[in-house]
Image (cartoon, rainbow, N blue to C red):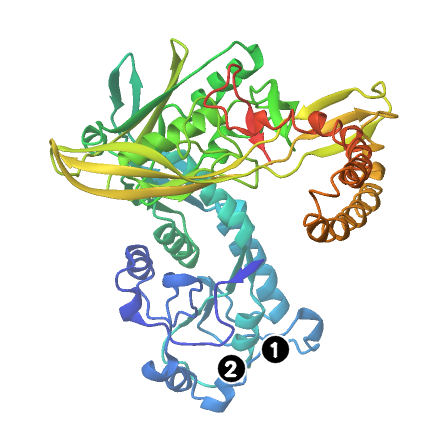
Amino acid sequence: MRISFIVRRVLMSNPKARANKKTKQKQIRKNRRTGIFVGVGVLVATVVVFSAAALGAPAMIAEIFNTTLEEVSSVEAETPSAWSADSGAIADGIFIDGVNVSGLTRDEALEKLENEVRAVQLQNEISFRHDESVFIRRFGDFDITYDFMLAISFAYTIDRDREISRPLELVSEVTYDYETVADVLSWISNIINIEAQNATMVRENGEFVITPEVVGFEVDHEHLMEDFRAALYNRESTEIVLEVVETVPELTEAIFARSTNRLGSFYTTISGYDPGRNQNLLNASYKINNYIVMPGEIFSTNRAFGEMTYENGYRLAPVIVNGQLVPGMGGGICQVSSGLYIALVFSELRIVERLNHSMRVAYADYGWDATLATDLIDLRFENDTDYPVMIVAYIMNNRSYVHIYGHESRPAGRRLELFSTVTERIPAPEETVIEVATLAPGVRETISPSRQGVVAELHKIVFDGDTELYRQRVNVSRYRERSAIVHVGAGAIEPPAPPVEPPVPPVEPPAPPVEPPAPPVEPPAPPVEPPAPPVEPPAPPVEPPAPPVEPPAPPVEPPAPPIEPPAPPVEPPAPPQQEPDYYDEPPPIIID
């Protein structure tokens, strides 16, 4: 993109606007002639706006050349090909870019300007100075071009027979390539600039190590562009003193010195031994150790842990997917996130996002855990204090520790205690039986035990010393119930059991009609009892029939045993429905 430096109309420059331009004043003193300077700077705050109307430039030009305002304002640039064969010369007293073109034809004036102006001015130098550093560039390095057509065309329109009261100096149009200029100035600025560096703080061997900040400075680009355009306008070698602006870092040693109070801590116990899982715990702790969270910043555990890849330091370890243990990259990192969560609760920082596992884990009670799932579930918190907060995490003696440090603004003597309670237990649904051909007939294999659901609440008690101030609920966690998943061998006895149950109703219905006849037998009993003394012999024959009526009942009940035997195999899974209080094996991440 080319930038035109001189306006295409002849305007009177504003002496007041140029008064503060030292280099322009130097040119005025050097020339010691009165002239009309044509031009205008462009771009940003460096644009010098020339008001022709205010200064009466056209009127002055008309006065000098005894011509009319209409003639002055109607001048347009022409190309050499448009010039006629007229060999008339330019009037006396005309200068273009300091070169006398009086008495020359337009072609002669153009050739003279090309040789004496363009070739010379492109060799002019601009020196950029900062302290002892100096960077020198020629005009030609900025892809500068000069357009003499407008000035020559205007000079040629002046009536050669009219008298000129004083010499007239015209300035040609200058253009430069903005991208080229920007690249050169950026290159110089990048050498001069010193980037501000924040103070740093880490915790090593139980102590804080604070590195002081570095104050930086950078070149004022706006002023640099203004000075550069002024140098082009002056058409001579010049020096530009670079102005720099100091940049103060955001974090200073003084700020960190006030951010060393422990706000909250927690640790979880690492049980069992799984090399992959232990590596994941170490790696996750390393990712967030000495992590600084700025005031107002929201911390994302997923972002801090990074991608669950081998290249990022994670290994395969057991995870639970749909109730089954499978190898998964990063298994175990939720133990670190759970420790971080409780440390944040003790710090009383604002929790933005947190979700419990789908089941209780061995290293944390109900409501004390925080699960993760990349791009789906995260643990996030906001540093809602006025000072930086630092996370310190490490593994030591089979424990995963997390500490939160910052500026303590809470009242002295304030302390917290946490406890969780189960508010609801939800029975596990009926087991899910899947017939498989890989098991022998009648063989049952429990793939995933049943699990009852639990709703729990985490509460905090706030004390002032030993005096309890109040209690507050921290979260409500719901651990989902799950049915047992059982594989049964194809051809097992259990599958036929369902079709046996339907015939049971038709067997039991006949029992009622067998018992109804008993009442009609008993009704006649009363009339028979009166003559009982005399008719006792026949009584025995009347009661004997009753036994034959009752015997059929036993044959009806016997079928029940073969129907109920299948039930025992269905009930064995019931015991696992009770929620275990702990796990013997290290728990994996729960991904549901």
**At 60% from the left edge and 71% from the top edge, which residue is drawn?**
105
Q: Residues within 10 Å of mark 2 (few under 14, many from 20)?
A: some
With 361 as the anchor, is 85 left or right in this view?
right
Q: Is residue 89 above or below residue 191?
A: below
**At 78% from the left edge and 39% from the top edge, which residue is drawn?**
546
Residue 127 seen anywhere in this rendered image of the structure: no
Horizontal and vertical percent position of residue 333: 50, 24
Q: Nearer the viewer, residue 459 or 495?
A: 495
- The residue indicated by pointer 1 is 88
Amino acid identity at mark 1: Gly
With 225 as the anchor, is 131 left or right in this view?
left
Q: Nearer the viewer, residue 553 or 314?
A: 553
**CB contact under 8 Å: marks 1 and 2:** yes
Q: Residues within 10 Å of mark 1 (few under 14, many from 20)?
A: few
Quarter of the image for residue 424 reads top left
Q: Which mark is residue 432?
A: none
- Mark 2: secondary structure: loop
Q: Is residue 41 above or below residue 198?
A: below
Q: Nearer the viewer, residue 293 or 142?
A: 293
With 463 as the anchor, is 199 left or right in this view?
right
The quadrant in which the N terminus is found is: bottom right
Amino acid identity at mark 2: Arg
- The residue indicated by pointer 2 is 160
C-alpha distance separating marks 1 and 2: 9 Å
Horizontal and vertical percent position of residue 282: 47, 16
Horizontal and vertical percent position of residue 160: 51, 82
Horizontal and vertical percent position of residue 213: 27, 30
First-in-chain label (1 vs 2)? 1
